Amino acid sequence: MSIKSEGRGLYIGRFQPPHLGHIYTLKNILKEVNEVIIGIGSAQISHTFDNPFTAGERILMLKAALEDEGIDMSKVYLIPIPDIEMNYVWVRYVTLLVPPFSVVYTNNPLVKRLFIEAGFKVKTPPLFNREVYSGKIIRQRMINGEPWEHLVPKAVVKIIYEINGVERLREITKSDEVRC
Amino acid sequence: MSIKSEGRGLYIGRFQPPHLGHIYTLKNILKEVNEVIIGIGSAQISHTFDNPFTAGERILMLKAALEDEGIDMSKVYLIPIPDIEMNYVWVRYVTLLVPPFSVVYTNNPLVKRLFIEAGFKVKTPPLFNREVYSGKIIRQRMINGEPWEHLVPKAVVKIIYEINGVERLREITKSDEVRC
Amino acid sequence: MSIKSEGRGLYIGRFQPPHLGHIYTLKNILKEVNEVIIGIGSAQISHTFDNPFTAGERILMLKAALEDEGIDMSKVYLIPIPDIEMNYVWVRYVTLLVPPFSVVYTNNPLVKRLFIEAGFKVKTPPLFNREVYSGKIIRQRMINGEPWEHLVPKAVVKIIYEINGVERLREITKSDEVRC
Amino acid sequence: MSIKSEGRGLYIGRFQPPHLGHIYTLKNILKEVNEVIIGIGSAQISHTFDNPFTAGERILMLKAALEDEGIDMSKVYLIPIPDIEMNYVWVRYVTLLVPPFSVVYTNNPLVKRLFIEAGFKVKTPPLFNREVYSGKIIRQRMINGEPWEHLVPKAVVKIIYEINGVERLREITKSDEVRC
Amino acid sequence: MSIKSEGRGLYIGRFQPPHLGHIYTLKNILKEVNEVIIGIGSAQISHTFDNPFTAGERILMLKAALEDEGIDMSKVYLIPIPDIEMNYVWVRYVTLLVPPFSVVYTNNPLVKRLFIEAGFKVKTPPLFNREVYSGKIIRQRMINGEPWEHLVPKAVVKIIYEINGVERLREITKSDEVRC
Amino acid sequence: MSIKSEGRGLYIGRFQPPHLGHIYTLKNILKEVNEVIIGIGSAQISHTFDNPFTAGERILMLKAALEDEGIDMSKVYLIPIPDIEMNYVWVRYVTLLVPPFSVVYTNNPLVKRLFIEAGFKVKTPPLFNREVYSGKIIRQRMINGEPWEHLVPKAVVKIIYEINGVERLREITKSDEVRC
């Protein structure tokens, strides 16, 4: 291994929770690069509708799901990225926390723009049925009591059950209904 | 020049981007005071719909536009003001970053209220056709592909072209449409 | 008095402003515990629609209202709690700033969930006509020019008059209507 | 009670731990004002040599010691003040968190200067044998195994024993001796 | 894999740089637990005497050194931990960012104390010739031009050479000598 | 004027206070570039020994001194730069707040290193009798009651007198002598 960035890709997301679309993309990325850095965004946030799970829980979910896929974990970095409220500075801040990389994989237009302005090579991986495999849709299904388990790797379902994740999501999103 | 605040006015805005309404107001202010401090608010923010341009870009735009108007730049201070999330403390924080001043010019009710509560003299400059000369409307026109250049000083148009500002604004506001 | 937490309860709210529902709840709490810690949340925020009053003003309002009720202030702690933007860490952060306690009183589902996950005993006090006794409804009435004084302790009404609180609330909520 | 600041004094310290010098000063202050606000500085810090005790512990210690002196706690506010790293803004920030006051009591030259520059009336209370009644000296005695209990109110001694405060102080100050 | 914390240990350090003492300890830890979480402290800091290397560089160094030792990287988590300036809250904050664990390994008295107060099981691993294997001593040797390479894993030496780490350390520590 | 960075230089310092060495360097810089951006570091700090003056005061001092030298202020930007506690990110953060520039002038080894690592062209201007023209030495002379006025531009002396700067410096540095 070397400090050289060649052959290492960065994939950034919030993974609330990791779903089959993420796994599909990660497997495609690993066909193109030797190592992938998974940056777990909004790492300091949890217990909100947009970010119900902690960074530690998301690391655990991703590792379990990738191992179930037979992916060699020595090629994967799982790195929490707390928010910094300055878009222009954010790319540099990310490169402080992760090893060097030569290409960024993202479908988020803002993330894409920020890395391109900072001089990085950015690729847009094909999306896997994006109307369905979406963290927001999955969280909404959990709240509504609709099935969500088929959209998520089995190992992630198991962890969400163990931490009572659906119950947590439902309770914390009730807050707006009560006076304060 | 003196540490005395007399004859120095403060004008605070976000200038996203500077438009002809701002220039109109600044020229009126300079009829009343010898020097004007332009405080550029939300200075740490960029690459969002509300704040697409960096503080550095906004400083450049304002200087270019004021010089085109023949304004003596030795009478103008251009000072970025990063946000501080405490309204009650904000006025004091502004006075930390800028030279002393004897009057504040603002049309923003919150800014007006905060400076009045802190004991400052506040003037409300007449607005120049506010239905049209508004940063929000100009940004929306950029996104919609409608003409916006006539609402903004020529020097600002030139800089926005050079930095591909319209393209930036369109790309970063696409983010909500994509799953994460 | 002892470092022991037994007999001490925590009641957290934003108290924008304190209303008769809060007083009703506090009197009920003091039937169950010897001492009550009143945690004043979002303590660093003021001059917004959601949080118009400063922590200092809210402390003053609560003390005046409780004394009018004949409550022994040596059994009451009034402690401002500035926000920390990490839900998972927030409970620990609260216990840094306040004396030890054995039970938490709250009607907020998120607060309840966070304290339960952290291993605390949580009680949900009965709400006193929640359609009416709500900070948000009271603030909206102030803006609309509707009567609000009957929803709030007399001492709180007096302080809000003295600080021109209604005028403040109306002015700061005008901000969205003006261009910037 | 009123929003008026008359008759209310502010006394700011870190109280690591509260000692007999603090009590002496507080009793003198209460001869001059009706109410005293005790601002507990560096409230977010604990478990260091300079600040071994949490804000919650210091509130408990001060309340216990003042009650033992027979002081009416309805005249005392105990308010944690987390640090803000801007001296020029600090006074305004303090007034955000505490009720209004008309006079500040302090022996710290920086605190004195900051409040005077902000336009407040400042009094310097007489010190009670300052070579002995000093938080730093007391903490050093704890570490050295020398007697310290006679310098501190009995109620504070009791709480420090209950929380194993001396052991805590000794352990956390060993950190510099170990490699990392 | 499971959300259960059993069999997972946490080892926290700053690793400036990782040295043979760290590797010795990590190999011992992996005899006792199935998985080890390496928490890289002061992750946001770099380019100072105490913290010359970025978190990204330290992750790379640790991974390279552990792979050279034949350690299975699927059993190792490498997680940057930015500082939070509240000791009392720090343990909770760490558990936000990392997967659950059942035991903490540390030789730092403050870290030990904080985890014990928070209810965790803490072990003190035997130190491997601590007069020599110390980040501070190694950094001082680099500055002095003394040999340091024998104290550090070969893979770490290689990375420090590639990033001109010794030159960086020497230059940034010259700052105190120059006026400003 | 253009968004192009050519012909614009950046000079960063803390200017506590601006002295004749700074003026000498600024005049030399303006022989090489058309415009100079003066970045005023540690802008949020004041009322300490290292940083006694506010950013607003330092802006005023620099403007007055440069105007006395006959420098065209339309070629000078005076921009406060609050600290960000991440060296690796700091250069990017500076470029957020200031207009684009093509060369950096600095004598500080850390600043030099950080800009070089970020890919900027850095020049080291010749120092003007650095044993004497040093902010630290000037501040120490103020405290000691020794002459300092000959080391500082006349306009700066005048402002320091007006704000009672020497008295401020002496008082705030007395803090360590008093117990707390």
Image: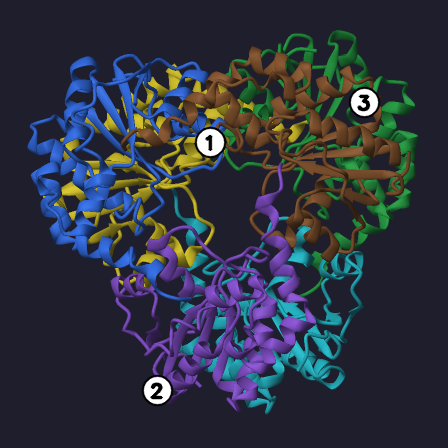
Chain colours: A yellow, B cyan, C green, D brown, E blue, F purple
- Residue F32: which numbered mark, if any? 2
Q: Which one is in front, D108 or A133? A: D108
> Would you place residue E73 above or below residue D126 in this image?
above
Q: What element carries label 1?
A: loop
Q: What element carries label 3?
A: helix
Chain ID, mark 1: A
Task: Locate residue E11: give its quadrant.
Answer: top left
Mark 1 to mark 3 CA distance (whole Å):
39 Å
* Label at residue A46: 1
The N terminus of chain C is located in which quarter? top right
Q: As drawn, is D132 to the left or to the right of F104?
A: right
A22 to B39, vertically: above or below:
above
Vertical position of residue A52 compared to residue F124: above or below: above
Q: How crowded is mark 2: few (under 14 residues within 10 Å), some or many (20 or more)?
A: few
Disc 1 marks a residue whose amino acid type is Ser
Looking at the image, residue A177 sits to the left or right of residue B115; the answer is left
Q: Which of E53 and F143 is in front in this view?
A: F143
Kind of residue at badge 3 = Met
Tell if the residue under mark 1 belongs to the same chain as the one under mark 2: no
Image spot of residue C172 (x, y percent)? 75, 53
> Which residue carries the number 3 mark?
D73
Does residue F54 sit above or below D150 in this rendering?
A: below
Q: Position of residue B149 (x, y in %)?
A: 53, 80
Give a yes or no on whether discs 3 and 2 share a subunit.
Answer: no
Mark 1, Cα crowd under 10 Å, few <14 / some 14-19 / many 20+, is many
Residue B131 can be seen, yes or no? no
Subunit of mark 2?
A: F
D180 or A39, which is in the foreground? D180
User: Which marked residue is nearer to the observer: mark 1 or mark 3?
Assistant: 3
- Name the chain under label 3: D
Q: What element carries label 2?
A: helix
